[in-house]
Image (cartoon, helix red, strand yellow):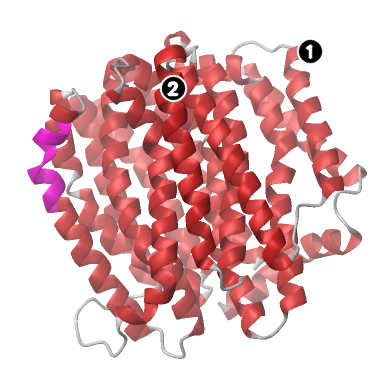
Amino acid sequence: MLDGGLRVFAAEALFPVTALITAAFLARRLGRDGYGLLTLSVTLVSVVQWTISDLFASATVHHVSQARDWVPVGRAVLRAHFIIALVCGIAVALFAGPIATLLGQPSLEPYLRLLAIDIPLYGFVLPHRFVLTGLGRYSGQAAAMACRWLARLSFIVLFVQAGLSIYGAILGLIAATLVEIVVARRYVRVPLLGRSQFRIQAMSPTIAPLFVFSVLMRAFAYSDIIVLTILGATIGQVGVYAAAANLAIPISLIGGVVSPILLSGLSASVASGDRSGAQQMARQSLRIALLLLPFVGLVCGAAPELVLVLFGPEFADAAVLFVVLAAAAVLRILVHCASVILTAAKKPAWCIPIAMLILLAALLGHIVLIPRLGAEGAALSTLIASGCAAAFALAAIHRVWRVAPPMMSLLRCGLLGAAGYALPQLIPIQGAWVVLQLSLTAPILLLLLFASREFSQDEVVILRSLIRLSPDIERNS
């Protein structure tokens, strides 16, 4: 499971790298207003795409991993997923005008219509990801995602440089989806046509609560930008906030990579009767957020200079926003891990109150703080809501499995996080040299984690063995 997680994470790690390069390129080429329009358009369509995805993601991984013959499951999910995505794509194209008018940005209409093409395409490729995860074919999943992120960067730069501006960026997104479809189907050909003995209704006990949880979490994730726009922020302010949010993407990425793989491992342990093993796995998964603290602290300390290098002086205000959003992203990793633990413990309905809490707290915070503090209020309310949800989630899993984050890990990682944050302040570096500073300091923090005995001897042995095990796992997969 760790080997598969590292493979998928290595591929997904290309996303924040290419996303930051893309964001820096687009911010400079499109300016605050153009970048804000593009971000708002992509955000609205992404809400639709990921809502559809959340309907089937966890349930598909669960059923594929347990099925003797995955083909009927894959066919049924692909067909349902694609049909729903196609209907939603048509709806977005038809209602693009009213949506743009509602947000007070009439110029969004043509961009939404063009982006609507990507909805059914994305709806076709995502079930391939779910099936590959359920089958444990992490190499194929990683290859498809890696090709997507590289193609996304390449096509966006190519089309925008050709003078297509925002339209070029959108065409680049669509082209990247087509590339992922081609690569994913080389590793697994999920059939779309033909009869399937598997019925989607069989997933309903798992689908319903997890879908509600995922929809609420997606609504929370995009609520800050949407509410910020509705409450009168200029498109330039939205662009600055989007730059800070994009810089926090690598942190949020961890939860998305870990969740499906952790669900597969925990479900297998519970099904085999190994409850104590599942509890140990759950406890260790909570350390993921803690282990990020030193490195998140380091990047936050260098945020002012990093923002100037990536986005330019026009986006300097994004540095403060990023620090707050980065802390919120770490807390949400705990929420996602807790939701997986509750699902494996056959308590998926418990995830719904957690998601309702984070969304309601965020909306209330946005309404109260944004009129007073603007973009800073949106970021602060996001952090407060994430903290409340994380506390509630940890209390829930402790009640079910008596599982909690290791306190010594919290202490060690918290101290190293503070040290990482202070270092760029004590040794300020200007310009692009800040990237070199981060590259040299991060390994030092990792060594300090080892020196503080954060990793047990068994964990060190496992990490070393991955190099030897990877070829065998690759052949078996």
Going 65% across and 65% down the picture, which residue do you hit? 3
Q: Is residue 341 left or right of residue 199?
A: right
Q: How many marks?
A: 2
Residue for badge 1: 426
Q: Is residue 98 left or right of residue 392?
A: left
Q: Secondary structure at mark 1?
A: helix
Which of the labelled discs sits on residue 368, or is there none? 2
Tell me the amino acid under the disc marked 2. Answer: Val
Q: Which residues are magenta?
A: 90-100
Q: Secondary structure at mark 2?
A: helix
Query: Does the magenta-highlighted stretch encompass residue 396?
Result: no
Inter-mark Cα distance, 1 to 2: 36 Å
Tell me the amino acid under the disc marked 1. Answer: Leu
Does the image show residue 18? no
Location of residue 422 in the rendering, given as x and y in whole percent from the top left corner? 77, 19
Does the image show residue 291? yes
Predominant SS of the magenta segment: helix
Going 56% across and 59% down the picture, which residue do you hit? 339
Of the numbered discs 1 and 2, the one sitting upstream in the chain is 2
- Screen quadrant of the C terminus: bottom right
The part of the image, by quadrant, that contains residue 243 is: top left
Mark 2 surroundings: few (<14), some (14-19) or many (≥20) residues within 10 A:
some
